[in-house]
Amino acid sequence: MKKPLVWTVTIVFVLGAFTALAALFILKNKGDRDDEPPASQPADAKLEPGHLKLSAEQIEHAGLKVEPIQKGTLAPDIRAFGVIQEDPAASFTLRAEAPGTLAPPPAAKDKPWPDVGQQITENETIGILQPRVMPSDQITLASQRVTLQGQLASAQADLSAAKIALDSARTIYERLQKLNAENKNVSDRAVEEAKAKVDTETAHVESAKKSVELTNAALDTVQMKLNPVPLVVAKAGEVVEVNAHPGEAIESGQPILRVATFDTVVAAVNIPIGETPASNSTEARILPIGTEERPLTGTRMGTAEQTDPKTHERIILFRVRIGDAKNLRPGHPVVAYVPAEGDALKGVTIPESAVVRYEGKGWVYLDDGNSIFERREVPLDHPSAKGDGWFVNSGFTGDEKLVTTGAQMLLSQEVFASIGAGGD
């Protein structure tokens, strides 16, 4: 009975010693960890939402650039919406000169007929028009041609006779003029009559020339009704409409195709009811949706004859030179800032580089001078006068310091810190 008791006491003693050592080890490690700050605890955990605190090293590493905010003024304007339309002055419609049938040019029968989007060069021949002439019309045209050919022969004969008479009258006039200059061997009256004869024959020559020209023009018109007519596009541009194709019969004046250039377009802008554009305004800032950072200048053309059928708002038309906006085409929506009556607005100008987008809004970061950066919302309603940022007339005193470089990095840091805080 003594041996089991000894073994039991020994085992209990060993287990107690092991437990004591383990407890001391755990307490020591816990004390060491309590002395160190949590690795995942964000540096700005106690700051209000929208605020971020960085150390001097972090600021230097991020390459932040802070500048005083710029005060300024902006002429009052009306923010209106519109749509891009084709500029009527920049398009050309090719129409049929006579009734007939379309065909490709004989020298390029395998060349495809122009299609929408294709570029056409100036004075390019796209096909021919084979006039449609009824048998009775052919007889009439043939009769007209014979008559005109007879008139042309007569007119040419009259012209030749008039030229001969003019040469003779001029020779007589020059001889009498010379004799009159030599001791008045011929009277002044005779010289004057010779001069009048020259003038009369000159008029006969001009009349005969005109008759020949008119007869030739009439013959060309008759011939044109019988011969194929080349279809020549007088202006270069992009094909925007194709109204007829080879093999189709068309009538005189019917459109065949239309080309347009898009160096200039028209912005049709709806002016909200109750708003009054400045009476002396001639230009407006036009911002195509999707490329607001590159505003365009629109020159006022006038007011459309009709109001918008849905909103009954007035429509003002602006001609816009698109410059580098090569993809701007009719139907593209735009926002226009039209000068309005009233005093200039006072506020601050925010450069584009300082603005970051987050949750569908615009934001900037302000430096309070103590390495704390505040994120503040910026309304993007008024582009700056130069188009390189935004004009804000509320929410700023004008004494703030603005982060103009590195704002996107601050937003990323703030979002990362908030995610880390939420994970704890």
Image (cartoon, helix red, strand yellow):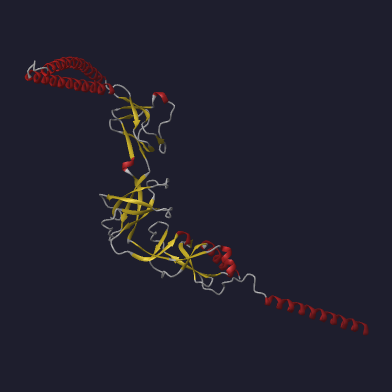
Q: Which quarter of the picture shows residue 312?
A: bottom left
Residue at (15% x, 22% y) in the render: 203
The x and y percentages for residue 60 are 57, 65
- Residue 382 makes an appearance in the image: yes
The x and y percentages for residue 239 are 38, 37
Task: Name the residue furthest front.
Answer: 183
Quick check: 183 left or right of 45? left
Q: Which quarter of the picture shows residue 73?
A: bottom left
Task: Name the residue furthest bottom.
Answer: 2
Q: Quadrant of the N terminus?
A: bottom right
Q: Which quarter of the picture shows residue 25?
A: bottom right
The x and y percentages for residue 382 are 38, 60
Q: Quadrant of the C terminus?
A: bottom right
Picture layout, residue 9 above or below residue 143 = below
Picture layout, residue 421 above or below residue 215 = below
Q: Nearer the viewer, residue 407 or 200?
A: 200
Picture layout, residue 299 above or below residue 341 = above
Quick check: 83 left or right of 416? left
Q: Nearer the viewer, residue 394 or 229?
A: 394
The x and y percentages for residue 148 are 21, 18
Quick check: 114 left or right of 33? left
Residue at (34% x, 33% y) in the render: 234
Q: Nearer the viewer, residue 248 or 340?
A: 340
Q: Nearer the viewer, residue 130 or 160?
A: 160
- Residue 308 makes an appearance in the image: no
